[in-house]
Image (tube, rainbow, N blue to C red):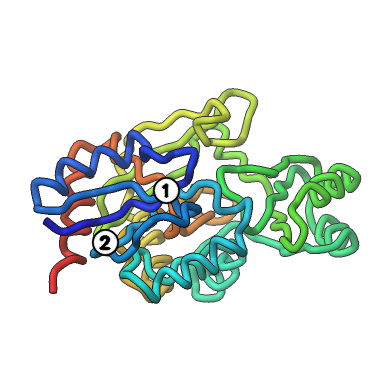
Amino acid sequence: MRNVAFLTSAELASLTADDRLAIAPLESRGVRVAPAVWTDASVDWSAFDLVVVRSTWDWYVESGRFAKFLAALETRVRVENRGARRWLDKRYLARLAEGGVRTVPTDVVATEAELERALAKYDGTVVLKPATAAGARSTVRFDAGDAARGREGLAAIAPGDVALLQPFVREVEDDGEWSLIFFGGAFSHALAKRPARGDFRVQEEFGGTVEPRTSPADVRAEAERALALAGERFLYARVDGIVSARFGGFCVTELEVVEPELFLRVEPAAPERFASAIAARLEP
């Protein structure tokens, strides 16, 4: 048996129900899975052939510590996605846009003066969020003319972080957000995440819902373009985005390669695909 750790947080020490779906398919391939909490100093990392970053969903609370932890861990054991800490900061959207990937226009703001200059470019509703947050935390929606609300949102962001200001894409309210999941660079499945009525956040903790969805060729092509531009063959990746008439089609909003939920539960074959991708990384 080969030993694999699924890296997680103390709150999810038994892993998420979704990640646990991969355990049986891995065991059938001669791979034993154990949860490992990243903040637990007693973990013997030498006991594992591979560490897969999974549900470390508290990383943003101490993002600097988490990045250093991953860098140190990679010197001791094989980690997937290796080097993913470079994708913790969502300012990578600028790199994707420069490479030709369609994204939602994004301004990076660190001060009130920068925020007010950026707001002056917009009409209507905007969204402000931290560059290193997760799960829509500290994300606010407000009218671009309400600079005071923007300043409140900026003040709520953790010291040392910066904010991303974007126009609000209204299609998310009705059509939802796309998530396309890839294993070993190969497309696995897609789904729609829709917000609760009156909200704009698609996460389930805010009342959002999830359903499987067949991805059109143009949506999938744009997601694959984002992955290709990243220049790495990730064990797993989730490309999120919104189809916007205003911005010309599918716009990538996030390239999630650190600890994304993979929604194995919405596609019956997904656990087997994920297990196969992990087993392939264990081959000599």
Amino acid type, callout 1: Thr
Q: Can you give x and y, in whole percent of width and height, for residue 172 in the image? A: 55, 39
Disc nearest the viewer among 1 and 2: 2
In-image side of 157 versus 15 (left or right): right
Q: Residue most toward the front? A: 42
| SS type, badge 2 | loop
> Which residue in the protein does label 1 denote?
8
Q: Quadrant of the C terminus?
A: bottom left
Q: Can you give x and y, in whole percent of width and height, for residue 140 in the image? A: 72, 41
Q: Can you give x and y, in whole percent of width and height, for residue 62 in the image? A: 62, 56
> Which residue in the protein does label 2 denote?
48
Along the viewing direction, whichever of 157 and 183 lies nearer the viewer: 157
188 over 143 or under it: above or below: below
Q: Residue at x 38, y 56 (%)?
A: 43
The residue carrying pointer 1 sits among few (fewer than 14), some (14 to 19) or many (20 or more) residues within 10 Å by Cα, namely many
Q: Residue at x 24, y 60 (%)?
A: 186
Amino acid type, callout 2: Phe
In-image side of 252 versus 1 (left or right): right
Place residue 139 in its image quadrant.
top right
